[in-house]
Structures are given as C-alpha cells and as structure tokens.
Amino acid sequence: MLSIRELTESYQSGALQPEMVMNEIIERAQADKEMNIWITPPSWTFIRPYVERLKSISREQAPLWGIPFAIKDNIDLAGVPTTAGCAEFAYTPEEHATVVQRLIDAGAVPVGKTNLDQFATGLVGTRSPYGETKNALKPELISGGSSSGSAVSVARGQAAFSLGTDTAGSGRVPAGLNRLVGYKPSLGAWPVRGVVPACASLDCVTVFASSLNDVDLVDQAARGFDADDPWSRPIKRKAAALPKKVYMPDGLPVFYGPFADQYKHAWQQAAAKIKELGIPVQTMDVSYLSEAAALLYDGPMVAERWADLGEFITEHENAAFPVTETVLRSGAKPEYDAASLFKAMHTMQAFKQKARQQLEDAVLVMPTAGGTWTRGEVRKNPIGTNSQMGLYTNHCNLLDLCAINIPAEDAAEDLPFGITLFSGNKEEHLINGLADLFLHGRRAPEQKTTALVAVCGLHMRGFPLEKQMKEHSALFIKEAKTAPHYQLVRLPASPEKPGLIRTNNPGSSIELEIWEMPVAELGSFVSLIPAPLGFGTIELEDGTHVQGFLCEASAARDSEDISSFGGWKYAQG
C-alpha cells in the first residue's frame, strides 16, 4: 500500500517524482482491471494538469503535495462524469465537490473515480452495473460497500488515500473487510456539497487510508465549515485524547456468514486487548442501537432515499440495478406517511439523547461487521446478506455519532477483522486517541490547551485582520521584538502586508505582538495564511522561541525592504 508519509519523504529526497508514482498507479490499475475497482480509471488524460500544477505550488504550503487519491463516483471531480453507479444518471460537473477542492488545494492529485454500490445503496460491493468490486485480499469475497472501489483502490496500492461516503456504514465496512483505517467524521464536519445524496440528512464524506497518521493529514485538509452547504457544521478538531471509559456490548455480539466462528474468535481477542489498555471498561445495553437502525431501512426514514432519487427512478424505467430499485422503492410505501415519519423522528430524538449522555467522555467499541460473505452467496440472497452487514453500523449517523474502523488481528489468513470506535459528535478526539493506543500502544500525551502566536502585520491590534485573532479566541499578551536576525519587507499585495524573513546576514530586530490562542483553533487559523507567508519558529530578542508568521525568502526579490522602520506600524504612510 502507498503511504502519505513515505511518499512525501521520497519526494523530498528526490527518490521519487509525482510522474513516476502516477505511471505506476496507471499500470497497477490496468493489471487489476478484472477487480472492477474503477468507473473512470487512472489516466494521464485528466491526471496531467494536476501534476503540472504541482510545479507552481509551494511544498511548505501544500501538506499533500503529489499525493494520489481516489474519489468515489458519487462525489464530483470537475470535468469528469459523476455516475453514482448508473450510466443513465451521469452528469459532468463544472466544479469540484468542496472536499475535493480542499484536497487539491493541499496538493493532492485525483487519479480516478471508483466503483460503488449504485446510488450508495448497499454494504456489499456487488450492486453495480460496472461489475462486482472484488475483495483486495480474497477476490471470491465481497469487498464491502457502498464505497467498494475506494477501499480496494487503497488496499491494492492504487491511491494513498481515497474518499468514500457513509450513510449507514459505507465508510467503515469496506475498511474492515480490506484491512484499512476508515474514518467517518461527525455529520457536517466535512462538507457534502458536490455529493450525490443518498439520505441527505445522514450523508458523510469519509476517508480510507493505511494508517491513522494518513487519515489525520487528510482530515486537516478536508475539515471546515462551508457556508454554501446547508448540512455543514463548524465542528473543529481537537488534539487526540483518551476517553474516561470504554463501553462494549453487554453480551456476545451476533456473528453470521460462513466465517462466523473465525469472526467470533477475532472479536474475543480484540475485546481482551481493549481490557488490557488501562482504561475502565463497562458493558452497555446496545439493543436500542438496533431499534434506531431499523428505522433507516425498515421504517419511514427510508423515504428520504426515495425523496432524493425517486423522480429519477420513476422517469428512467430499468435504469437502476434491480436490487437497488427494490430498496429505493421501499421508501414509497403508502404507510410511510407524514405522521409515521414524525413519530419515527421523535423516537430517534430520544435515542440520540440517550447516546449523547452515555458517550460523554466515553467510547463504544463494537465489531465493524459480524461476518462476511462470498460474492456468490450475496447474489443468492442480496437483501438478507446486506442487512446483516449493517448490523453494527446502521445506527451511527442516525444518532449523530462519529466513528472509526481500525484493523484488529485477522480472523484467519487474508481474512481481515475490524472493530469500530464510536463516540458523540464533539468527541472525535477520543476515538482517535483510543485508536492510536489500540494500534500502537501510544497514550495521547497531556495536551497544552493554548499556544503563543507571534504576529507582525495585519493581525496586530488596530489592523484589519485583528478580527481573525478574536474569531479564533486569541488573547493579546504583550509586545515583543525578534532577535536581530530578521528582515521586514513590504509585499507587493493588495492590501499591503509585511513579510518577516530570517536572514543569515546582519539583520534587524523587528517589533511584533504575542497572542495566546487555543490549540484547538490553531489549525483553522493557520489554514488562512496565504503564500508566500507561512507559519514557523521565530526567535525573540530574549533568546526564547515562539511560533508565528514568517515569509519565504524568495519574496524579498520583489519587495521593498522596510527593516529600518523596526516594525509594520511604523512603516505606514
């Protein structure tokens, strides 16, 4: 599998160039053609402009520079058809989905659009007219759905990470079946603008990767409020931390399928490991989670799928995959009237409140799936097998939870087994911290809650961007000066702004301000910094160091040296 960290190190050392990586991906995709991973496979036809663009991007400002990623084909990539697994539905978007645009802005390179269970309706990976996506390790088994191609593209080394979607488990089940990390952020944390809706109020964009570190890097680029997305919410990142307690089901979970015994043993091993992590473990009655999940496919809330796609289905006879159409049409049952929907919503609200209270400072651990199937078995019983695959996933978005699948010990040779960590929509840092402890034995360190930030220009008091400091809950601490090793330049920008450059020549001591900002706000604040400015370590005149605004040295060539003024506020007028 490909790794963001390893690719970045190879680029930095000169051992690899993006062109070499893309060529290898195109060759691998061609070799795996029979696995039905792609709808729009990797091709220089659309990859080349993104690779050429890398030449004009500062690597320091692009944390995903040259990193190849795959996109589930219900998420828009400008200029490339979005099919949602149905050729008759296809359209070619003019704009990227918000998350795709953010990843491209971070330097990532889209390499293709992946196969999926049609209209993201299914958890098995066999419901596509573009072929059944085969499991990355055992081709006779299902790959999981609906984000089947996205997961397998990463597991087969054809992308360093991939985007999926998750309404009822599609960002977790394929990860569990292909030995990947599958991260489903809280509802609204990643924008869904530019995503074909399955159930619009429940849909999430997700990421598949080979490691927690890679997932974290993608999350930093993709997360953030989108004012043009009605489902977007400002849910900010927090530093990884451990929960005060861990819950597990109060009884042996149900296991199914031809590998039920192997899955049962794998769960018992995983549960024993969790109990050895040093965090209090309690059991929890999870029966209400199943009651909540039943409302999605066996109750009136399935009508949301029909509301999103019913018009297309009725106007395009026989365009949909047969089993997909059966599922979608179930949302049009006459008994699913407005009264039944409101009754279900009231029941669901009570379940949400219960889950919110139980999972405060806590994480629930369950199997990602209770088993798996051969693709032949799914063909014989498409509804029943798919239903069982969602036994431990369907409740998640209905209850407004976040979740991450992580690999546990394999159930058997080339038979991966995954567990899912759940918590509330503001507790993503807890599932991340527990996942790191489970996988690597690392306890999240005690985290500083604030950091000092040095500013020397428009973010100082009385200047136009002081408001950004306050919007990120920063407090002014004091005025200070740099060590005498710096140059201050007036950048040719509108509005005018300064750039602070460290110099090896005799320099000046430049006046700046020190602010204190919550660590949780720092990531979103730094993301606002435009090139050629960046964020780095500044030495102060007393010999201490602080993080703050710096400028690329190359900017000095086209800028006026204003170091003699001693600070930006003295250089005005």
Image (cartoon, grey):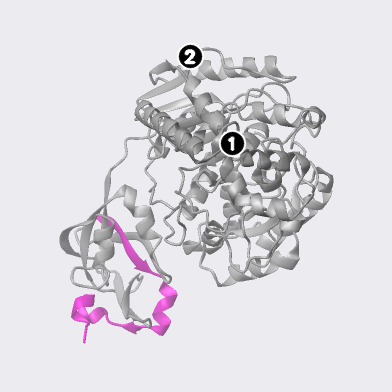
Residue 311: x and y, percent? Answer: 65, 54
Tell me which residue sits at (37%, 35%) in the image. Answer: 241
Q: Of helix, strand and loop, which one carries label 1?
A: loop
Hey, which residue is sitting farthest bottom in the picture? 573
Q: Please give left or right for residue 308 compared with residue 396 in the image.
A: right
> What distance separates the C-alpha of mark 1 from that of mark 2?
22 Å
The magenta span reads: 544-573
Tell me which residue sits at (71%, 27%) in the image. Answer: 385
Q: Please give left or right for residue 167 compared with residue 358 in the image.
A: right
Taking 391 as reference, is 515 above or below it? below
Packing grade of label 1 (10 A; few <14, some 14-19, many >=20) is many
Tell me which residue sits at (61%, 56%) in the image. Answer: 67
Residue identifier under label 1: 169
Along the line of sight, which residue is nearer the eye, 438 or 362? 362
Residue 235: x and y, percent? Answer: 39, 48
Q: Is residue 61 visible?
A: yes
Residue identifier under label 2: 250
Name the residue type under label 1: Gly
Magenta region includes residue 550: yes
Residue 224: x and y, percent? Answer: 43, 54
